[in-house]
């Protein structure tokens, strides 16, 4: 199970995620209580293990802004919170090659199966992150979508499309999400915070442990 802890604003929290066993950390370069800039992130990333993926979260940003931020901040991946734009993802892939991981976000809605079908043929993206949105926010909402309704789409998406579940996950419910959706990965931000932009060490460790245990149980039950 791939695990990403998003919405980091400082070195201590990003190191905590790495030490807890997460595979990736995220930094939000968009309107948010967790917003950071390239200068701030550039002094965090050199102190993180090479093995942990470092994602920048972008909302409606253009190629130039994203490419510059990736280089200045020392990122290894991008999370695109905007309507899928095949031209943008191709530009990023052409520019960075396979060194950059590209996550496309779609917000859960009734037609998400249709959206997944379209993305199935998108060669430039590495995974699709399914998130919740509210009237005022496109990410970091702490709101879960209807996992039961979504489970069919998750389990029937094409095997080459890696699906990451996000939106309202927390230590108390990540096992249920994994059992219901059987995603390739999980992503969390507000569910492991003590306040917006500050991670709670106990909750981060509990989240990673619960996700790993649930994933092992799902694998064992499928044998
Ligand atoms: O965190 C934000 O405020 C934010 C703002 C705009 C776009 C994305 C944002 N966050 C992305 C994430 O933190 C997560 O990838 C995802 O949305 C899950 O968040 P949560 O429901 O808080 O676990």
Image (spheres, rainbow, N blue to C red):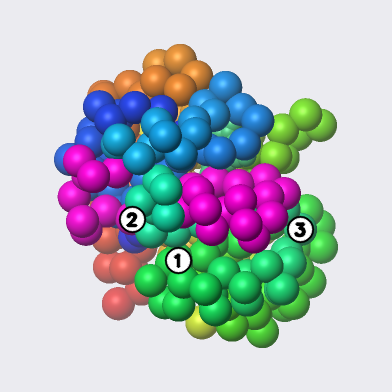
In the picture, measured across the screen, residue 120 lies left or right of residue 162, that is right
| Residue nearer the viewer, 28 or 147 | 28
Q: Where residue 196 appears, x then y in whole percent? A: 50, 19
**Which of the image's four quarters has the N terminus?**
bottom left
**In the displayed structure, would residue 106 be above or below residue 189?**
below
Q: Where residue 203 appears, x then y in whole percent? A: 32, 27
Check disc 3 and report its element: helix, strand or loop: loop
- Tell me if label 2 and label 3 are in contact, CB under 8 Å: no
**In the displayed structure, would residue 100 be above or below residue 185?**
below
Furthest residue toward top: 195
Kindly tell me whether residue 42 is visible in this rendering.
Answer: yes
For disc 1, the marked residue is 101
**Magenta-drawn segment:** 45-70
Of callouts 2 and 1, which one flags the residue occurring earlier in the amino acid sequence?
Answer: 2
- Tell me if label 2 and label 1 are in contact, CB under 8 Å: yes
Of callouts 2 and 3, which one flags the residue occurring earlier in the amino acid sequence?
Answer: 2
Is residue 66 located in the magenta-colored stretch of the structure?
Answer: yes
| Residue nearer the viewer, 122 or 66 | 66
Give the residue displayed 73% in from the left and 64% down from the top: 84
For disc 3, the marked residue is 83
Give the class, few, some or many, for how many residues have Cα within 10 Å of label 1's Cα (few <14, many ≥20). Answer: many
In the picture, measured across the screen, residue 103 lies left or right of residue 8, that is right
């Amino acid at each position: 199970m791939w695990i990403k802890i998003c919405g980091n604003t400082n070195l201590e929290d990003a190191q905590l995620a790495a030490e807890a066993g997460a595979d990736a950390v995220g930094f939000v370069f968009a309107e948010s209580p967790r917003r950071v800039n390239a200068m701030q992130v550039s002094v965090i990333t050199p102190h993180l293990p090479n093995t942990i993926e470092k994602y920048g979260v972008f909302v409606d940003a253009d190629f130039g802004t994203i490419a510059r931020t990736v280089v200045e901040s020392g990122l290894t991946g991008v999370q695109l919170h905007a309507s899928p734009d095949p031209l943008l993802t191709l530009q990023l892939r052409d520019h960075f090659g396979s060194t950059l991981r590209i996550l496309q976000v779609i917000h859960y809605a009734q037609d998400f199966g249709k959206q997944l079908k379209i993305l199935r043929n998108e060669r430039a993206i590495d995974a699709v992150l399914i998130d919740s949105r509210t009237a005022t926010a496109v990410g970091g909402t702490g709101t879960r979508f209807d996992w039961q309704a979504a489970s069919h789409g998750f389990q029937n998406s094409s095997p080459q499309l890696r699906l990451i579940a996000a939106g309202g996950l927390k230590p108390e419910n990540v096992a249920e999400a994994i059992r219901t959706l059987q995603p390739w990965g999980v992503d969390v931000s507000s569910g492991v915070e003590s306040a917006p932009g500050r991670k709670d060490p106990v909750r981060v460790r509990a989240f990673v442990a619960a996700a790993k245990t649930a994933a092992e149980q799902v694998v064992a039950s499928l044998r």
